[in-house]
Structure formats: structure tokens, C-alpha cells
Amino acid sequence: MSLRTEKISRAIQRDLAPLLSRYCTSILPGELVTVIEVRATADLGLAKVYVSVLGSKDREKSLQIIESKNKEIRQELARVIGKRIRKIPELNFYLDNTMDHAERINNLLDNL
């Protein structure tokens, strides 16, 4: 990943995190959505957004709801970051499984 791509990924993450958090309070009441990481492609055509959803009984369904609002979220991001970044990439949302892996490892270690 080039330095430019990393900078843009961090900028998208920094501006998308509070925007997504505010936006999700209306579409996912009682759930906390945080942006864990953003990875933009070299051509900046696509950004993979890894999110964590806390307080959800069905995280996959929550992710589908977020994905269904993708266009609106991208438009809001364009309003916030549009003056600094010429081309706003398409956003693809993915669940971050870091916590699941950590919990599984802890359980395995506890059983030793």
C-alpha cells in the first residue's frame, strides 16, 4: 500500500467513524457501530470499511442494514471530505472479527 493510499484510508476512517456512528443511531437503535479499519485500493475506486457492531443480536443483519444505506453514507462522506479528496471511493462494509478471534483464543487458552 502506498503512502498516499494509506493517508487517504486514514482520512476516510477519521471522517467516516463519527458520521457512521451518528447515522447508525437512527437505523440501528441501541447498537454501537465503530469503524475499525479502512483499506482503499490503489486507484481509490473502492474502500473496504471494517466495522464492529456492539449490542446487536444479529451482527450480519446489522451489516446488511448498514450496506442498504451505503449510498446515503457515501454522499454524507462526500460532503465532509469532498474538498480534500477529489474522488470518493465506493464503500464496501465488512464485519471486523478481531474480537471474535481474541475471544476464541482466550477460551482455548483457558481450557489448557
Image: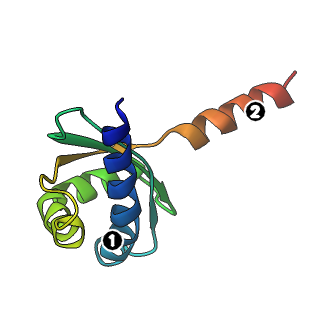
Which residue is at 71% across, 29% downward? 105
Q: Amino acid at mark 1?
A: Leu
Q: Quadrant of the image for the N terminus?
A: top left
- Is the residue marked by circle 2 packed among few (<14), some (14-19), or many (20+) residues within 10 Å? few
Depth check: 98 or 14 in front? 14
Q: Amino acid at mark 2?
A: Asn
Q: CA distance from mark 1 to mark 2?
A: 35 Å
- Is the residue marked by circle 1 packed among few (<14), some (14-19), or many (20+) residues within 10 Å? some
Q: Quadrant of the image for the C terminus?
A: top right
Q: Is residue 73 left or right of residue 63?
A: left
Image x and y of residue 74, in percent: 17, 61
For residue 13, what is the image quadrant?
Answer: bottom left
Marking on residue 107:
2
Image x and y of residue 29, in percent: 39, 75
Which residue is at 67% across, 32% downward? 104
Depth check: 92 or 67 in front? 92
Which residue is under mark 1?
19
Depth check: 39 or 34 in front? 39
